[in-house]
Amino acid sequence: QVQLVESGGGLVEPGGSLRLSCAASGNIDGFQAMFWFRQAPGKERELVASLTKGGSAAIYPDSVKGRFTVSRDGARNTLFLQMNNLKPEDTAIYYCNGNYGMSEIWGQGTRVTVSS
């Protein structure tokens, strides 16, 4: 079964940047659309970025639009999330997700903390 492994989280000050990575153990082209979600303490999981199969189009909610950018590197089988101008309310565990064949695949998450 294909697995997704996130990395790149950490502690950053408000206004700072982080780039998250999501490495697939198989061919990333086998996924349909891919997504980044986040879950803050005590809150429901929130979709923060969607990328169409092949990476031709991306969609973001208003909460991150203009600050977050999702991309993929097919040669490295990796999905990225570039996060700029981070705010304390971006603090959460970030997960990548996608459907591979008939299976929905989730990564284990990477923690992002935005604090001074």
Image (cartoon, grey):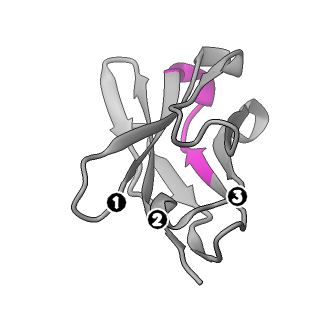
Quadrant hosting residue 98: top left
Kind of residue sitting beneath label 3? Asn
Quadrant in the picture for the N terminus: top left
Which residue position is annotated with label 1? 40
Q: Earlier in the sequence, mark 1 or mark 2?
A: 1
Foreground residue among 9 and 88 = 88
Residue at the (66%, 38%) spot, across then down: 77
Mark number for residue 97?
A: none
Where in the figure is residue 52, as x and y percent of width and height?
Answer: 59, 17
Q: Earlier in the sequence, mark 3 or mark 2?
A: 3
Q: Nearer the viewer, residue 32 or 42?
A: 42
| Sooner in the amino-acid sequence: mark 3 or mark 1 | 1
Q: Which residues are magenta?
A: 21-32
Whether pointer 1 and pointer 2 mark residues with C-beta atoms closer than 8 Å, the reply is: yes
SS for dot 2: loop
Q: Which residue is mark 3?
A: 85
The relative height of residue 59 versus residue 49 in the rendered view (above or below) is above
Please report the residue visible at 70 percent of the width from the left and 58 percent of the height from the top: 85
Check disc 1 and give the amino acid type: Ala
Residue at the spot x=72%, y=68% of the render? 16
- Work out whether residue 20 or residue 60 is closer to the camera in this orientation and state it: 60
Kind of residue at disc 2:
Thr
Q: Which x, y percent locates residue 45?
A: 30, 45
Q: Position of residue 114 (x, y in %)?
A: 55, 72
Name the residue that disc number 2 marks. Answer: 91
Q: Nearer the viewer, mark 3 or mark 1?
A: 3
Q: Judge from the rendering whether residue 89 lies leftward or rightward of residue 7; answer left or right.
A: left
Q: CA distance from mark 3 to mark 1?
A: 18 Å
In the rendered structure, the answer to whether residue 14 lies left or right of residue 115 reads right
Circle 1: element type: loop
